[in-house]
Image (cartoon, rainbow, N blue to C red):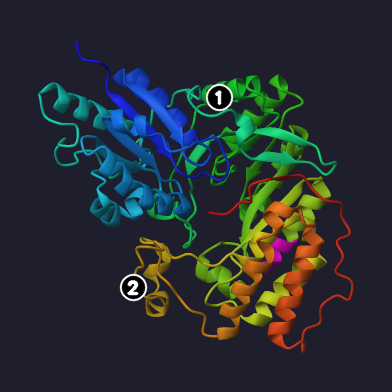
Amino acid sequence: MRHPLRVLLVSTYELGRQPFGLAEPAAVLSAEVGAEVRTLDLAVQDFDEAAFSRAELIAVYLPMHTATRLAARLVPRVRALNSRAHLAAYGLYAPLNAPYLRRLGITTILGGEFEAGLTRLAKRVESRIASGAGASDAGVQTEAEISLDRQAFRVPDRSGLPPLERYAHLHLPNQASRTVGYVEASRGCKHLCRHCPVVPIYRGKFRVVPHQVVLEDIRQQVAAGAAHITFGDPDFLNGPGHAIPLVESLHVEFPDLTYDVTIKIEHLLRNRQHLSTLRDTGCLFVTSAVESADDAVLEILAKDHTRADFVRAAALMNDVGLILQPTFVTFTPWTSLQGYLELLELIAELDLVEHVAPIQYAIRLLIPAGSMLLELPAVRELVDEFDEEALAHPWSHPDPRMDRLHAEVLEAVKPSRTSGTPRGESFQKVRTLALRAWGGEGIALPPDLAPRRSPIPYLTEPWYC
């Protein structure tokens, strides 16, 4: 009797989180196919030659840009080590980079709701092996490259992953830390922000993970030591009727457990009646992709909020007693030097210096393959040909000072990730660089930019892709 299909699920990077994108399909493939599933997270584990060599199906999880670039270096090594295995890639960035990945040696590409596709692929590979053909010769892909079909989610199998202690922690103002777990209560998004990688795949749709699956996943992570949970949903309030009862149930069962979520500025304002519930059920902070304080840039990005909305949301969050953690795309082709300085001024005026991870001052607009920004003629005229090594369309700012400033700011904030440099100190460094680029004239910044609030809790892995 033949052994079960040997599957290896691989992650290269997922923002310092224990990958849901390995644990959940591991449970699905084990239950639906009877496969022998191993998981390998190369962000915290060494390359395991034996695991790659014995696998018959190797599937690499690509939820983000950095993970995909790392995988591009990995695939040739894997192909050289094990030419018999069938190679697949799944996750948001797999379909976006399908031609490139196929040239590297990936045979099957799966995006969107990928579990059923992985299951069908595993059965197809197993059938080919049983017929005497090799795993790598499983024929032309018959699974949909992008599927939005509703999935039968299972409780993730995290038993084969490294312990939570090896991943990002929650840093508290008193210098203590908490072990962090990670779950997804929904995938996709109902919005169409042009720069977002979710949009080309989901096109305004989102799918929810059943409450019982999410809660059971949290239970097993709490049992493994988690004292804080990050909800990885692109927007936690895409479906308030799903999200709010979930955290209410969570709080009843684990009253001391804290969590964080990501919510659009638009949704914070529209769903203000739910913010006190988030606060009262243990939400420590809300990440929101503000992106810019320039209304013209926000319109290009189709963010569906304005600078004034950001200001209102910041005030609302302060009134409710929730911490707003804004993120930005600080360098775009349309952001002027004056606009950059005005953003710094606004962050200081709103007393959000302690709320902004220093790396956010250096985030540069990424235009990957398939970006909805490429639908704009002005963007197509601006960008260069697709750079496969960078996995993006390069662009240069029409004002050379901005490209120089980006390089300087990026260099200035790099040490803050590991040295524990106070956020206020990093902010002052960035402000000094921007003023120097400007020439120090014509901008009225507050004379005292020292943060008035105390430091806030934050995750030790900054939020960016």
**The furthest residue to the top:** 1
Q: Is residue 243 magenta?
A: no
The spot of residue 427 in percent (x, y) is 76, 66
Residue 352 at least partly seen: no
Up-down relation of residue 315 to residue 385 (above or below): above
On the picture, is 27 further left or further right than 304? left
Amino acid on which the number 2 mark rests in the picture = Glu
Residue at screen point 58% across, 75% down: 296
Q: Secondary structure at mark 1?
A: helix
The spot of residue 141 in percent (x, y) is 19, 41
Residue at screen point 55% across, 42% down: 233
The spot of residue 371 in percent (x, y) is 40, 62
Q: Which residue is mark 1?
A: 217
Residue at screen point 76% across, 36% down: 177
Q: Which residue is mark 2?
A: 385
Kindly indicate the quadrant of the structure image that contains residue 256: top right
Kindly indicate the quadrant of the structure image that contains residue 4: top left
Amino acid on which the number 1 mark rests in the picture = Asp
Considering the whole magenta stretch, tell me its main secondary structure. helix
Numbered disc in front, either 2 or 1: 2
Closer-to-camera residue (353/302): 353
Kindly indicate the quadrant of the structure image that contains residue 185: top right
Give the CA separation, mark 2 to mark 1. Answer: 43 Å
**The furthest residue to the left:** 132
Closer-to-camera residue (26/390): 390
How many residues crowd around disc 1 within 10 Å: few (fewer than 14), some, or many (20 or more)?
Answer: many
How many residues crowd around disc 2 within 10 Å: few (fewer than 14), some, or many (20 or more)?
Answer: few
Q: Which residues are magenta?
A: 306-311
Q: Is residue 310 magenta?
A: yes
